[in-house]
Each structure stands twice: as structure tokens, then as C-alpha cells.
Image (cartoon, grey):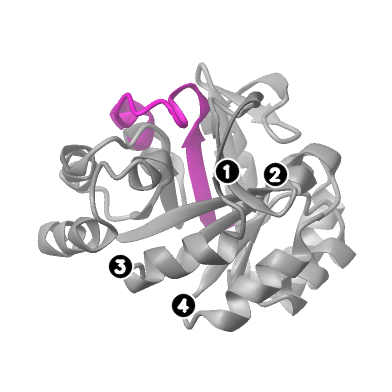
Amino acid sequence: MILYPAIDIIDGKAVRLAQGDYAQQTDYDADPLDAARRWVDAGARALHIVDLDGARSGVPANLAAIERIASALEVPVQVGGGLRSEAAVAGVIAAGATRVILGTAAFRDVEFLDAVLAAHGDRVVVSVDARGGLLAAAGWIEQTEVPVADAIMRLNDRGVRRFVYSNIDRDGMLTGPDLDGAREVAGVVQGTFTYSGGIAGLADLEALAKLRQVNMTGVIVGKAIYEGKFDVGDAQALLDKLR
């Protein structure tokens, strides 16, 4: 599995939210490139970037920061937040994104999803964000009544083969991963997925790896590395060992 350090951007700064709540924001780096360089220097092989302003407004708002990160560092970056039009997706790719992460629009606009898949294929990832086992939308602000498994099966049918699964209840809380949720998602995804939410230490990464779900190919970590709970290089070495 690949460790993806998370770089969440608001107003051009690297921040973390607790449970996706914009009112519970902690600022870490005035320049998100500093965070990105720190994680890559520590051994990160890829980065997970979310434009939180874009996720909330529906339009990308931090393209300049994304472009600076992508051009300065020689690792793949996957980028999400506000990608609800073909033009927005094209703009993020032009800024240097290796992969684009769709959220709300992938579920609500099948014509858009089909068009982006046709244009960008394997570079398209869909984020399935869960609160209480049900799909959340619009930058985690809106709550639906759609079970996560149902949402994934619909996306499978549209041809989506790359996913991110996020447990919002655990996001930024350092309470440990949602192992049952990861297991459930692994059972329905036709392709691969990356897990996100609750990672607090190396033991949590080990627990995920020991699920032995071959289609879980990565894990996103945010607050734990910003708070120094473990070293990025040590974490990637552990995941390599347990592969």
C-alpha cells in the first residue's frame, strides 16, 4: 500500500478539519508547498491534495497552490475539491494533477461522470465519503440516505475503477481506522480504493494492512503526521513490509 500524506488547502494554507467541520479548523503551514516538501523529503511517494474552498463552493479555488506543489516535487499528486465540471477537471490536470478526485458531481451528474471517464480514464478517482455508513456530499456538508455500498455499486456500473473511501466520523479525530467499513468497501469495489479516516499511529496502518484486502492499495493520513504521531518514511516502510 502507498501512504498518501493529505494536504488540505483553505485560503492558500495547509489545514486540517475535524470530522469535515469547517468550524473546527487547525492551520499548519502558511504555504502548503512547505508541507508537501516536508512529506516528500520524509519518504512520501505520492500526495493527496484537497481544495477545501473548492469543495465548499463547487469551483476550484487554489489552483495556484496545486500547480506550485505539482511542479516543484517529482511525485504523483491526486487532487480533489470542487471538480463539478469538465472545465474544472481540465484545469486541475493542467495544474499538474496526476489523478483527479470527483465527489458530489460523480453521483448527481452521470453525463458529467461519463464524459470525464471517457476523457481521462484511469486518472479519474471517485471519493465515497461516509457518515454513519451513509453517503455525504457537497464537501461533506450535505448528508444523504444512500448506503455506501449502494453508491459504490452504482459507480461500478458506470465504469469507475478507482475510489477513495473516507469515514467522516473518524476524520481528524485520531480514533483509529474504520476496519469494518474498509472491509465492506473492499467487498463491493470493482477496482481499487484508498482508505482515509482516523489513522493515529503505526498500529492503525498495520491493522489496515492485515485486513489483506488486495484492492485496498493506499491509505491517506493527515493529522497524525502533522502532529508528529509517526514518521512518513517509517510508515511507508511498514506498509512495504506488510505487503
Give the residue number, with chain letter if any, for mark 4.
Answer: 75
Magenta range is: 159-182
Q: Which mark is residue 42?
A: 3
Q: Residue at x 78, y 60 (%)?
A: 114
- Say few, some or many: other residues with alpha carbon within 10 Å of mark 3 (under 14 / 14 to 19 / 20 or more): some
Question: Going from the N terminus, do you reach mark 3 or mark 4 first?
Answer: 3
Give the residue number, with chain letter if any, for mark 2.
Answer: 52
Pair 1/2: label in front:
1
Distance, label 2 to label 3, CA atoms, is 25 Å
Q: Secondary structure at mark 2?
A: helix
Q: Amino acid at mark 1?
A: Val
Q: Nearer the viewer, residue 162 or 158?
A: 162
Q: Residue at x 88, y 66 (%)?
A: 87
Q: Amino acid at mark 3?
A: Ala
Residue 37 highlighted magenta (yes or no): no
The answer to whether residue 111 is left or right of residue 12 is right
Q: Nearer the viewer, residue 45 or 224?
A: 224
